[in-house]
Image: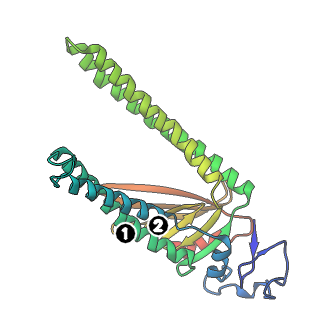
């Protein structure tokens, strides 16, 4: 695990007792009596780690899409425009503008929350994974997500074959077209189910390896998770030894009428007090 000065955030070469950059002691007097966790100057550390607010990128993209969609709507109302009177484009532009505006507002709120982790304002604990720890974490998530996706794909494919098969047996015309649609749908779902774990594995392998844990949200190797909105919260938190040493967090949220849960398997370097951290988050 990379080590950083508790005062200025400069990366250390080894187990120095004094920072060569600012001269601050690296001894354990910075341990919090309340949490048992090392207190850091997170703002300085995060500045050196160069954490990017990934949610802000989505916000900027959503604003540009909203602007382009509004422009499309305007062009359909101007007599001089080649799109004048094309009402399907008006409807499409309005729908896209509304959708991207909602995305921009949601991710703007997420960006503000993530910024409080990056600044250290809401951080309970933080560390950075080594390349080996990051590889173990990435490959575990890949295997976990792939097995889950294959199960869902199998069930979905069975239902598609049953539903489309009944239509093919009952209709007199268009059986070939119906078969093509069925096979195309299965291929698309298969590409998604098999491709997304590969995409996320590559993204995890090339992310920054930084872990920032807050009471209501967390930044895990480039991905932001939060459970502070209405009808959401931590359902379970505990230290784990398998598949690696670290912290397990299960949080829930309600989407329309359904309760959904998300699981976070967060690796931690040996010596990290994940027991105290679990107690802190579980309060």
Disc 2 target residue: 56
Which residue is the extreme one toward the front?
80
Location of residue 256 in the rendering, given as x and y in whole percent from the top left corner: 27, 56
Return the mark for residue 229. 1
Disc on the earlier residue, 1 or 2: 2
Question: Are the residues flagged by discs 1 and 2 in contact, CB closer than 8 Å?
Answer: no
Marks 1/2: CA–CA distance = 19 Å
Q: Would you say 232 lies left or right of 271 here?
A: left
Location of residue 106 in the rendering, given as x and y in whole percent from the top left corner: 36, 65
* Position above or below: 47 against 242: below
- Mark 1 lies on a secondary structure that is loop
* Position above or below: 87 against 28: above
Q: Which of 217 and 249 is in front in this view?
A: 217
The crowding category of the residue bearing disc 1, from other C-alpha atoms within 10 Å (few below 14, some 14 to 19, many at least 20), is few
**Residue at (63%, 75%) from the top-left corner?**
46
Q: In which quarter of the image is residue 257?
A: bottom left
Q: In which quarter of the image is residue 232?
A: bottom left
* Position above or below: 261 against 42: above
Q: Is residue 228 visible to us here?
A: no
Q: Quadrant of residue 130?
A: bottom right
- Mark 2 lies on a secondary structure that is helix
**Residue at (69%, 51%) from the top-left corner?**
135
Q: Is residue 160 visible to us here?
A: yes
**Residue at (63%, 47%) from the top-left corner?**
140
């Amino acid at each position: 695990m990379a080590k950083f000065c508790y005062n200025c955030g400069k990366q250390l070469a080894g187990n120095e007792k004094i920072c060569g950059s600012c001269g601050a002691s690296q001894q354990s007097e910075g341990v919090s009596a309340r949490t048992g966790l090392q207190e850091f100057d997170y703002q300085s550390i995060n500045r050196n780690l160069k954490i990017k607010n990934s949610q802000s990128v989505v916000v900027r993209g959503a604003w540009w899409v909203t602007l382009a969609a509004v422009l499309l709507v305007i062009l359909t109302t101007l007599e001089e425009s080649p799109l004048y009177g094309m009402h399907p484009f008006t409807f499409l532009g309005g729908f896209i503008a509304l959708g991207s505006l909602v995305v921009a507002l949601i991710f703007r709120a997420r960006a503000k929350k993530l910024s409080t982790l990056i600044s250290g304002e809401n951080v309970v604990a933080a560390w950075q994974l080594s390349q080996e720890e990051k590889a173990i974490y990435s490959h575990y998530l890949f295997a976990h997500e792939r097995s889950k996706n294959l199960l869902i794909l199998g069930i979905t494919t069975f239902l598609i074959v049953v539903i489309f098969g009944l239509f093919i047996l009952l209709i007199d015309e268009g059986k070939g077209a119906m078969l093509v649609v069925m096979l195309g749908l299965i291929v698309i779902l298969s590409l998604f189910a098999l491709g997304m774990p590969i995409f996320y594995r590559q993204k995890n392998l090339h992310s920054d390896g930084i872990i920032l844990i807050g009471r209501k949200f967390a930044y895990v190797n480039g991905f932001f998770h939060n459970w502070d909105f209405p009808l959401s919260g931590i359902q379970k938190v505990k230290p784990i030894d398998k598949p690696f040493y670290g912290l397990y967090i299960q949080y829930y949220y309600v989407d329309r009428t359904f309760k959904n849960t998300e699981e976070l398997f967060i690796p931690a370097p040996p010596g990290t007090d994940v027991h105290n951290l679990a107690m802190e988050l579980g309060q």
